[in-house]
Image (spheres, rainbow, N blue to C red):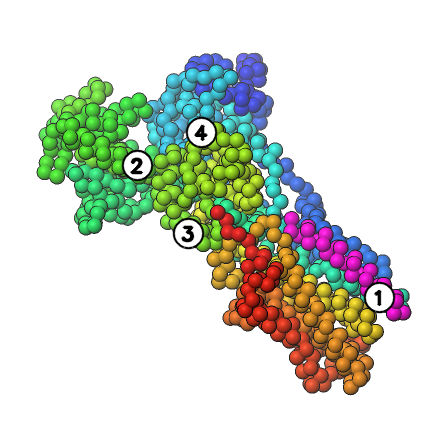
Amino acid sequence: MDGQRTAEAGRATLPAHPAAASDAYRLDPARVASRLDVDARVGLSASEAADRAAVLGPNRLAEPARRPEWLKFLDQFRNWLIGILLIAAVVAAALGDYRDAIVITVVLQINAVLGYVQERRAERSLEALRRMLVPTARVRRDGAERKVDAEGLVPGDVVLLEAGDRVPADGRLIVAESVEVAEAALTGESRPVSKSLAAVPGGADSPVPVAERTSVLFMNTALTRGRAEMIVTATGMRTELGAIAEALRTGTEPRSPLQVQLDSLGRRLALLSGVAVVAYAVVALLHGEAMADIVLRSVALAVAAIPEGLPAVLALTLALGVHRMARRGAVVKRLASVESLGAATVVCSDKTGTLTLNEMTVRSLWSAGTLYDVTGEGYATSGTVRTAGPSRTAHAGGPRQAVLPFAACNDAHLTGDGFVGDPTEVALVVLAAKAGIDAELLRSRSPRVGEIPFDAARKYMATFHSAPDGRVRVHVKGAVDVLLNLCARVRTEDGEHDLDDRRKSEILAVTARLGGAGLRVLGAATAVVDRVPDRAAPTGLTLVSIAGIADPPRPQARDAIALCRSAGVAVKMITGDHGDTAAAVARELDIGGEVVTGADLDAMTERQLAERVERIGVFARVAPEHKVLIVRALSHRGHVVAMTGDGVNDAAALRAAHIGVAMGVTGTDVAKEAADMVLTDDDFSTIVGAVREGRSIYANIVKFVRFQLATNIGAILTLLGASLAGLPAPLTAAQLLWVNIIMDGPPAMALAVDPPRDDVMRRPPRDPKERILDARRLCAIGRAGAVMAAGTVALLSLSRSPFGTDTALTMAFTTFVLFQLFNALNARADEGALLGRDQFRNRTLWLCLAGVLAVQVIAVHLPAAREVFGTVALSPGQWALCLVTASTVVLVELALRGVRRVLPTMGPNGPGAGRATPAP
């Protein structure tokens, strides 16, 4: 009965939404416990916890509603181009042209299966990355400590936490001993936040920002220092984390540039198909051709006008790109995401953990009037402590006495999985190792007999150690300005001296210099006292050293940003960290532009932000809503925006961007769910590989479209030209289908795997508004089609008299096929040298072209094939004549390019036509 009463009380008071639990930070612990009907000394009973779990459900984020598999498969057919091809297949079947109908249907099915299987494979890979939420939690239930599944937590549970633990739910602190929490995943703040039991003032009308709610803990943050107990106030989707996840459900994803391009291409090809069919039918009727032949050729032309191989080539190109990216550390959730990143003009990146290591590192050390540079990055203990300046003398073992207080006055320690503790203290332990000090050994030899824990109000920490003479050695670390008030002396190059005003000024100048470089500055002092003071501040200290600490950039990030710059892709840093710190990291990474803060953004209108956004390089102290505004402003300026990040605070912007890239190791579940791509190695440089892959994919699609449409235009013009000239149709319906099959098959697929050009990352990104078929490419396609038609019709006309009509028709058919072999070279050299070394890098294409030539020989010389295609055998001389005629499509292009070099301003065909403007 008591359990039932308690559960009913819980139902009456348990929050139904995060807003209802968000006032816990304003209440004292006793009142929170009262509202949740729990005695913090005993905790909930097992039955109470079960009843509350039955009401509120498990402590996990709700997964998005899964789309049925059959709908996912049908999604592969949702674009204009595939719709047109389906209609063409139905028309062909209705007219008895079952071969064409079967070919189109098979191609579309292959495309759908490729897309569906690849996206399912990516989803399964992503499932393996979801490890952020802790599986268990330590709680107090029925008066005893227990370990339970984190999903089983309910409001009212008392959770016990230590340094290194991840917080499993939102909760109000009831015990806080020197607690600091890493909240970078939620707020973007790279430094741990001090927590206390004191309620935070604030009213319902003016809620305190999440980053300033120092009396509560939030789901998926982590304790870096101290010991804590909390009463759970919100679980699952009712947490701050859940609120962000819920907001993502209302977000919309922009369509990729490729999706827009293909839909536009489909509409234009539909118009072209209709015009071609009508034009041919009218001309053929005027010349008295048989209606049955006109209908069959019209259907063949309708199919020929549309590159039905494009969906399959697109799926193959994207799938191969995704496979290559997976081998390089990226899991792509949507096939089109790779191409979208290839079109990116701006990459907006979070700082902490993405551009930086998220491992605090001592970069500078000052002691006894000497400034030292500390080499090495992150938590690796390899590195040296050497004198700054031209001499850069490396000290054997480093300045041990300067580092010793930092190692002794420290709670971080090494475990089998690495370091555990506050990131700043870990950085100081690593510094000690570089100076030749084993912190663990030091502490064992000089045991701690007392301490004054770090407190945000005091701004220092002190530890007391037994000395050999029976006295007590005190080590203190903290803010330099605070330590100066506790110090009477300072260590100099010639021993200890009184800390007079002149020396204070010198020390403050060093502090300002390090702080101006974006470093967090800590001082260390020491003294020998008779006994451990009774919580009183230690005085009479000697200032020993000053350390400058920073979260260093990832080594690969520097090169990656430089490569982005050469590719015309701007990189912008977006962080919740302080402006000075962010600016310092930006300088190291060579990210230029203005530095603005969240407060500056609040003072701007959306229009003002859009006008300035391209000049800004660093956005500091921003909130999640600011990130979405930044992405929106860039999008309004016409940019294709890629957003990288790992924290919950990045998730909304990841969804708003054209492509979101989440970190697989440090990223939260929410960020991974919102992103289009997940990096398994958290390496910013992997994104540059994706940009290269995306550009290569788009270039290959352009090559295929140019190659295929030149064939289609050539076929249309050939039939129209022959009809206008009063010649017999040079291509029968079967021959048109044959050309369609062999050109949509191996050569097109070979173009899909064309390796990227050497200069692909030295070109600016294309204009996202640029059409696949811009004026320059349309001219090239029309020119190639006209040359094919002119050569085929001319050869047919000139060969009838000496060789006979049947031979002339076979020569015309063969010439048209050979034209495609040469035109593949034109398509590959869209902007490069037509006969350069790049032409020989795609061995697959050359094998495919040789295969096409072989099957054409079979179509001309094999008796059974001659019956199907209506051909006759050709002599070697006739083959040579066909080959020479077909080569004119390359010779004309070579001649035109030679003229362009002499006259570089020839309208839309000029060398700069159709190229995008570099990103800012």
What amino acid does circle 3 point to? Ala
The residue that label 2 is drawn on is 516
Number of the front mark, 4 or 1: 1
- In primary-sequence order, the first of circles 2 and 3 is 2
Q: Is residue 149 left or right of residue 195?
A: right
Residue at position x 55%, y 53% in the image = 916
Measure how far apart labels 4 and 3 are at the Cα level: 30 Å
Could you tell me how far apart the alpha carbons at marks 4 and 2 are, in whole angstroms?
21 Å
Expressed as whole percent of the image width and height from the top left, the position of residue 475 reads: 20, 30
Q: Tell me which segment is drawn in magenta.
A: 260-288
Left or right of residue 640: residue 482: left
In the image, is residue 270 part of the stretch drawn in magenta? Answer: yes
**Split into 4 quadrants, where in the image is the N terminus?**
top right
As drawn, the label of residue 283 is 1
Callout 2 touching callout 1 (CB < 8 Å) = no
User: What separation in Å lies between label 2 and label 1 (alpha carbons)?
Assistant: 80 Å
* In the foreground, 454 or 69: 454
